[in-house]
Image (cartoon, rainbow, N blue to C red):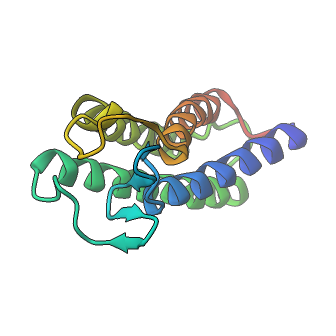
Amino acid sequence: MLVLLAGIFVVHIATVIMLFVSTIANVWVVSDSPKASVGLWKNCTNSGCDDVLSYAGEDALKAVQAFMILSIIFSVISLVVFVFQLFTMEKGNRFFLSGATMLVCWLCIMVGVSIYTHHYANGYGTQYQSSHHGYSFILTWICFCFSFIIGVLYLVLRKK
């Protein structure tokens, strides 16, 4: 049981780190010609990054930014609640609060990345038409899977 809890804890920390990286990094869409990448915050080319996104004023991008920040917040809260429950909860109880918080994080990731996929995937809405997904976009989908698995495991596990 201790090994399982330690493993979940490590995967949860990895998920938090990956959420930070995927939200901060500007590599959601990558273009090969010209060499450039677009993220949630900046547009980067060979000459450097600038704060000018062609779609920066759109509500869809603001929603994606908000949901990704919310997912980080809920993931960190879930981690803190898990550690708190680990040391204060009575034996035999389940980790309901940390599981529910992690599933809210999962929901925020799903909404944010779904909006981004619908509006901006494959260069649609950006100035780069011959483009593909960057590692930030892929990391976000990996975090989506991990947060669901962690949330369900928290709900199923009992403290022994």
Residue 58 is left or right of residue 26, and the answer is left
Instruction: Pinpoint residue 35: horizontal percent, then vertical percent.
Output: 45, 53
**Residue 2 falls in which quadrant of the image?**
top right
Q: Is residue 89 visible?
A: no
Residue 93 position (above or below residue 69): above
Q: Nearer the viewer, residue 50 or 151?
A: 50
* Screen quadrant of the C terminus: top right
Q: Give the residue drawn at x 54%, y 59%.
A: 21
Instruction: Pinpoint residue 70: horizontal percent, then vertical percent.
Output: 35, 55
Instruction: Pinpoint residue 48: horizontal percent, then vertical percent.
Output: 42, 73
Q: Nearer the viewer, residue 89 or 103?
A: 103
Residue 74 position (above or below residue 147): below
Instruction: Pinpoint residue 11: horizontal percent, then vertical percent.
Output: 71, 45
Q: Give the residue drawn at x 56%, y 57%.
A: 81
* Screen quadrant of the N terminus: top right
Q: Nearer the viewer, residue 113 or 129?
A: 129
Q: Is residue 36 visible?
A: yes
